[in-house]
Amino acid sequence: MYKLNFDNKIHVHFIGIGGISMSGLAEILLGAGFTISGSDRECSDLTKHLEALGAKVSYPQAAANITDDIDLIVYTAAIADDNPEFVAAKASGKPMLTRAELLGEIMANYTRSITVSGTHGKTTTTSMISQILLETAEDPTISVGGILDAIHSNVHVGDSDIFITEACEYTNSYHSFFPKYNIILNVEADHLDFFKNLENYRASFKKFATNTSADGILIINNEIEDVKYFTEGLNCKVITYSLKGDADIVPTDISYNEKGFASFVPVYNGKSLDKVNLNVPGDHNISNALSAIALCLEMGISYDHIKAGLAKFGGAHRRFELKGTYKGATVVDDYAHHPTEIKASLSAAANYPHNRVVVCFQPHTYTRTLSFLDDFAEALSAADVVLLADIYAAREPDVYGVSSKDIADRIEKLGTEVHYLGSFDACEKFLEKNIVNNDLLITMGAGNVYLVGENLLNR
């Protein structure tokens, strides 16, 4: 595989440069002094931003974009095999890397590389750690899967030897990463269209755990089933954390303010530290914070900076994000699209001021919906009222014989008020008539269900 050297400022071309992840990597290389070109189907705010930084972007994708002066070509998994530019790239004989492979190569150029992996919480925890690092004199390079308000972007090009990114397990893309500091937040069945079963999914994370540098640290949630499966035989240091005790770092004296934001006293290796105040809700964020605290302490970051960063972190976009009020109801948007994430979100909502919790949920992918029908119903039944929009297909064809109505039927049997409405328009009309003062409305899902709340707020 092609090895990227930051001392050799080559010309890198991105096929599909306008995606949020690809554009972020292009921006990092631009900041490091590389010559960057790329192409996409159409102009966007992201491509305009790259052009302003000095990238040359072509529209649309075409074979002519593969010019002789290009040294390395990067492409996304979304590029079709018959894409004319991709075909020309392969025919050129030039070195080619996938997006994930490039990310791994970029990471290798930083002495202190950090990855955050897990089924849930990657973006939030990566953002939380980034906020702490930004409190220090260090200037980290950051690549995160959502917009972080502190940098007004999903990417920040720093000038230190620290690089932090979230590590997605889908298609085993994170196997291209070899971090010094590796966090595994949780491991639960997901992406079964690729992994097929939980055994394969766990084996993927086990392999990734072995990618941690021998002189590095794996920080792992001790609540993961049979956690020793992931840690036995590793050459690196292992640190565990848990909400339930029996770990290297645990929380004590947990309390919640009027917004459901937690305060707690971390106990690390038997020593109580100063109280931490979070600015995000939910026990899952206490858990995320424990991993962040352990990492930053091991990196030598002062505890004052850790406390300050955690207090300032107000959440990543689309993670229990307060959007506004509609008819006296609080409107929140949340990215939860797995049953465990839904449970965590609704648990956080229980500590948030409300009379009723009304959830408008859009399932994400047919395979995930089919795999977790009963689990979705059980998790969503914790709400007072559930509205169901049609499944967001993402990359999948509608050939699985499953629909949102299947979830609705199961929720109804559990005794929770539920309405299968299908379209966003139907959801909005229902909410116009039925939402009342002091309701907590949560638009929930990894698709575009946030539009329901935004459309209501814009009326």
Image: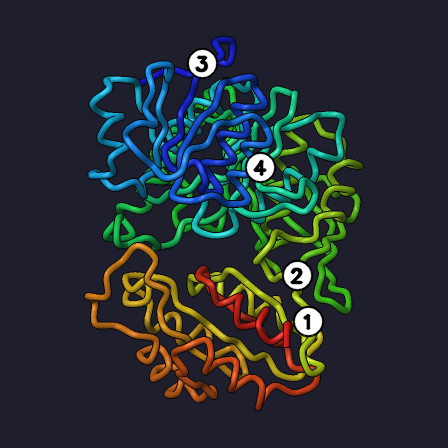
Mark drawn on residue 352: 1
Q: Are marks 2 and 4 in contact (CB under 8 Å)?
A: no
Element at badge 2? strand
Alpha carbon of mark 4 to alpha carbon of mark 1: how far? 38 Å
Q: Residue under circle 3?
A: 10
Alpha carbon of mark 1 to alpha carbon of mark 3: how far? 51 Å
Q: Residue under circle 2?
A: 281
Task: Please state which amino acid type lies under the numbered disc 4.
Answer: His
Q: Is residue 76 left or right of residue 143?
A: left
Alpha carbon of mark 1 to alpha carbon of mark 2: how far? 8 Å
Q: Are marks 1 and 2 in contact (CB under 8 Å)?
A: yes
Q: Residue under circle 4?
A: 49
Of marks 3 and 4, the one in the foreground = 4
Q: Residue at x 51, y 27 (%)?
A: 55
Task: Please state which amino acid type lies under the numbered disc 2.
Answer: Pro
Label 1: how many residues lie within 10 Å, few (<14), some (14-19) or many (20+)? some
Mark yes or no: residue 369 visible.
yes
